[in-house]
Image (cartoon, rainbow, N blue to C red):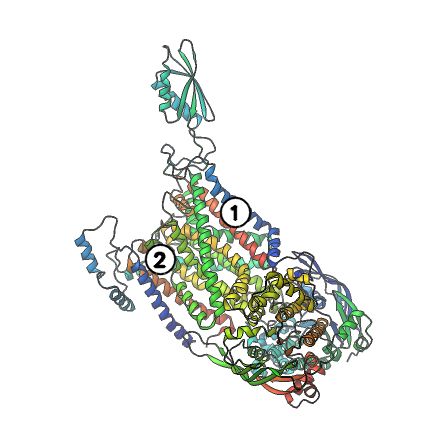
Amino acid sequence: MAETNETILAIRELKVNFTTPDGTVNAVKGIDLDVRAGETLAVVGESGSGKSQTMMGIMGLLARNGAVTGSAMYRGKELIGVPPAELNKVRGAKVTMIFQEPMTSLDPLYPIGRQIAEPIVHHRGGSYKEARKRVLELLELVGIPEPARRIDSYPHELSGGQRQRVMIAMALANDPDILIADEPTTALDVTIQAQILKLLRSLQERFGMAIVLITHDLGIVRHFAERVAVMRRGEVVEQGATADIFDRPTSDYTKMLLAAEPHGRKAPPSDAAPIILEGRDVVVDYRIGGGLFSGGASTFRAVDRVTVRLREGQTIGIVGESGSGKSTLGRALLRLVHSEGRYRFGSTDISGFDRSRMRPLRKAMQLVFQDPYGSLSPRQTVGEIITEGLLVHEPELGKAERDRRAIAALSEVGLDPDARNRYPHEFSGGQRQRIAIARAMILKPKVVILDEPTSALDRSVQGQVIELLRSLQRSHQLSYVFISHDLSVVKAMSDYVVVMKDGRIVEEGETDSIFEAPANAYTKSLIGAAFNI
Amino acid sequence: MTDIAANPLNEPPKTVSRSLFQLALIRFRRNRAAMAGCVTLLLIALFSFLGPLFVPHTYDQVFPSYVTIPPSLQPRPDVSTLQEVMDGVAARARVKLEAFRVEGQAFTATISSDEPIDPRATRYFDRANEFRDTKVEATENDGRVLKLSGQVNREYFPFGTDSNGRDLLARVMLGGQISIAVGLLASLVSLGIGVLYGATSGYIGGRVDNVMMRFVEILYSLPFVFLVVVLVVFFGRSFVLIFLVIGAVEWLDMARIVRGQTLALKRREFVGAAQALGLTDWQIIRRHIIPNTIGPVIVFVTVVVPKVILLESFLSFLGLGVQAPLTSWGALISEGANNIQSAPWLLIFPSIFFVATLFSLNFVGDGLRDAFDPKDR
Amino acid sequence: MIAFVLRRLASAVPTLFIVVTISFFLMRFAPGGPFNLERPLPPATMENLVRTYQLDQPLWRQYATYVSNAVTGDFGPSYVYKDNSVAELIGKGLPYSMELGFYALLLALIGGVAMGTVAALRQNSALDFGIMSLATVGTTVPNFVVGPVLTLIFAIVLSWLPAGGWGDGSLRFLILPMIALALPQLAVFARLTRGSMIEALHADHIRTVRAYGLPSRVVVVTHAMRGAMLPVVSYLAPCAAALLTGSAVVETIFTIPGVGRYFVLGAINRDYTLVMGTVILIAIFVIVFNLLVDILYGLLDPRVRHD
């Protein structure tokens, strides 16, 4: 694709600092990067690596407390430290950008057509009326169905994928030289992700602009980029051709990142293992809308007659995209949401159990959430958090005994027992997820529902958490329901996979058979999107 | 997967462990305006509550000879007035005043006459309001010249007096006590009702929430000042009732804020985790919901306190506040507003304290909001 | 749209009804009555008055009579201003209150939004600090202090403006009460605008338009302002209802013959019908302005359009 090797954006000694009330944060510590005409450069790093702030700094988009120094030359024109009017000639015309959050990146108060037209009118002159034709072309180009009708839609009337297409249309409007894509697919479902990336690639082939792809996802990088720069803590630790970096990484950090892709398998349970948790014909309806006096409430069926049987020591992976009902199913199995169906726990029929009758059983059925920031109360110490369940289920324990159990639980998940006197905000995402796991483990449960436990974590941390979960399962004969949209993690964790879409099971089976020979078209597209973009 | 934004608090653990509350406190201490506000509030509170111990006059003590006198640091009556009074006394005692000096609260005088003076003439001096304990210090010239000494009744009115001859300083202090007490107690009442109501409504949700919020909406559509006025007019005007009434009206906002917070918190996963642990609703409200609403609630209280003080002063302005001889800043200001031409100090002094208090509360409130919600605002 | 308006008006009926009911019984269960004066009336007179005004009837019947009359627009006679019906009193006073309130609203809205926007754009500058200090003064100094102080300065010391009264209704008479009435609301609008403007300027979609090189005038006016106006518009409803129905304090200080004084006077005198009349008046204003603001909001924000 790269016809010339001409460098069109040269970044030298770029630094980004943030002044905060608690001191200065050096987000980017003097990096050098080149972007060549028509190439795809991936800037890879985990959260906090400064990869986004580098680009925000160049584009003059830092928060008020941010400052950028150094140099970024676009075709001989300096972009750092120039007046906004000067910068405005380049950004939006020659260098454009799309963002991670398609939900909030568009102004909710204007139709999308007008928003796409704005940079055209501004950079090329003319009226909105004249720009309309170009906008229609662009919408067509990025694959928005019925552009003539959609052009007057508001952002909230479009899906996340469509909004990202609108952003891409906006980015292409002035035939840019460089398109900076800041985590363009992170907020999207896997299948949509693949479509957006495919779109970007085909557009690049047609128009020949350079793409700077900022991402944490090595899978995308491998299939999409020609060159890679790996960033860590504000520095570029390694850069080069994609194939070289993936095959012969030189820095330890890159090696670690590459090794962090989940691998390995879990030993399946014996066929004779008894069923520990069963939900038959599970149905969950949500009531939408409807006030006290006004009618008009409708119901939305989140889970539609799903049956799940979990054996002792087994891990069932539940796979699906957002809105597939997989999380709701997990909560229904724990009887945390109102649902219909027949439920058994061990030999007990718990179908008709209300909250107070479920309470004694909660000890044996635990839940771990996705967001390690949201799942720990910020006002409690770690010790209070993890021993809270003991107050309910083993109220006879004294303070000293509870503390002893807390120490044991923290050591088991690989944390320093001193952590119990500290507060959650003092820990990183991975450490917090370990705390959340300790909170579940302290009760010595039999079944744990893991709801996207690794999705909010960096890849390198993800691998460690998966390893921890597997070892806990071995030493305590735990049974897991593992809910995730991330197929590679599911593959590494599960014995049995259930694929859900729109509240129903579209396919289920042993992990190997699902991944190697998917029967259902949707399953195939999911696996295709995840493993070979 | 956001990059580090501007929040180094998310960095890996430091050696010293601090709760969010402690961190907020540290941020708050760095805010100069807010700290100045705190100090001012403290000083005003000390002035109002401890000041009366150092002022010789009580708030209801009437000085008929000092009605509506302007503020002055000089004691009253002043020396020239005393001289006049002394001249008058001497004339009545049919003696000649040779010398007269006032030093602080004591005076010395020398009187003479052609005849020897009866020492009982001192009674003439004590008969004047201004002098007392007149004693003969020395007799000269066969009793024709007497040296007298005694005490002067001098009063200090640094803030002046009101139209009833009461010391404004003492009254401003009392007004401060009542305004601050009403502000705090009414805020506590609204806090108590509001937090419980809002948290319950938000947490239970669904139909219960609908009914509870509908009730709040109806109370909202009652003109709220009307409600207070009606309650105060109809149920009497005691101090306790006033803060109960104000508190009972002010809880609506608090309930809405706490409900909003609760709805947001309910969706947070730690509440889900608590449910999965088997905590009861009440345990969740108590252990998770209420502690996490504390930040916004504290900030809101700093908004409610001045609002309540304003409301109380508004009632006093309408003549519905605490009853004389008790007073509040609002009542004093209203009195001052009525006498603005003849006695502007009656408006100025209570207004200074009132406005300083409200200003300080404002800065403290802003400081707390920044401390609890450290965005780049 | 019409369906939406009708639906909203229909849902206002029960609210109004509940307000009327609560106010009615709240007042009646309180001790005292309109004719319990400091100097007791002769029993015969008292009996006569009570019979004339039907206060001897059972409470539920009085209530039923009141509600059925009120529906037809008859709010009964005032017990204290004996020559006037409540409708007449309100009809006479309301134009004064509304005219004054309208000017005050205009001043508060335009001044507040302008000041708030400037403060937000120059965040943390001296100008920002100055504007916010003024706003703090506006919220902390009650209008019964502002009123007399304004009178003292402009009417008594400088003799530029009249000290009170409506006069011929010319602007000279309106300036001081208008300022006293508008200042607290102006402060609220300024704070609200500043806050929402700063938040709007931090929004992701503002970052987008900046990334596309649009000049800052477009960024601020077209994109940030419109979003920032939403909370301001929401506050418009209670503010307009409060200003247009008059303020007891300002009307007392500046001796303006509006309706603002009536509910205080009515409450103090236990003039049941007058109080009920003003309560209904205020409630109707609140309901109508909430409706207007909801329609306006829908025009500004496509996400809540009411079709």
- Residue A451 appears anywhere in the view: yes
The image quadrant that residue A293 belongs to is bottom left
**How many residues crowd around disc 2 within 10 Å: few (fewer than 14), some, or many (20 or more)?**
many
What amino acid type should be assigned to the residue bearing mark 2? Answer: Tyr
Given residues A282 and C202, the one toward you in this image is A282
Q: Is residue A186 above or below residue B235?
A: below
Q: Which residue is mark 2?
A: C96
Image mark 2: chain:
C
- Residue C183 appears anywhere in the view: no
What amino acid type should be assigned to the residue bearing mark 1? Answer: Leu
Horizontal side, residue B164 vs residue C76: left or right: right
Given residues C70 and B203, the one toward you in this image is B203
Q: Which mark is residue B41?
A: 1
Residue name at image x 74 percent, y 62 percent: A15
* Residue B373, position as x, y percentages in the image: 58, 60
Given residues A379 and A100, the one toward you in this image is A379
Instruction: Assign a secondary structure to mark 2.
Output: helix
The image quadrant that residue B142 belongs to is top left
Quadrant where the C terminus of chain B lies?
A: bottom right
Image mark 1: chain:
B
Mark 2 vs mark 1, foreground winner is 1
Instruction: Assign a secondary structure to mark 1.
Output: helix
Residue sitting farthest toward the left = C44
Quadrant where the N terminus of chain B lies?
A: bottom right
Residue name at image x 28 percent, y 57 percent: C271
Q: Pointers 2 and 1 in contact (CB under 8 A)?
A: no
* Residue B131, position as x, y percentages in the image: 40, 25
Given residues C301 and A340, the one toward you in this image is A340
* Residue A262, position as x, y percentages in the image: 72, 77
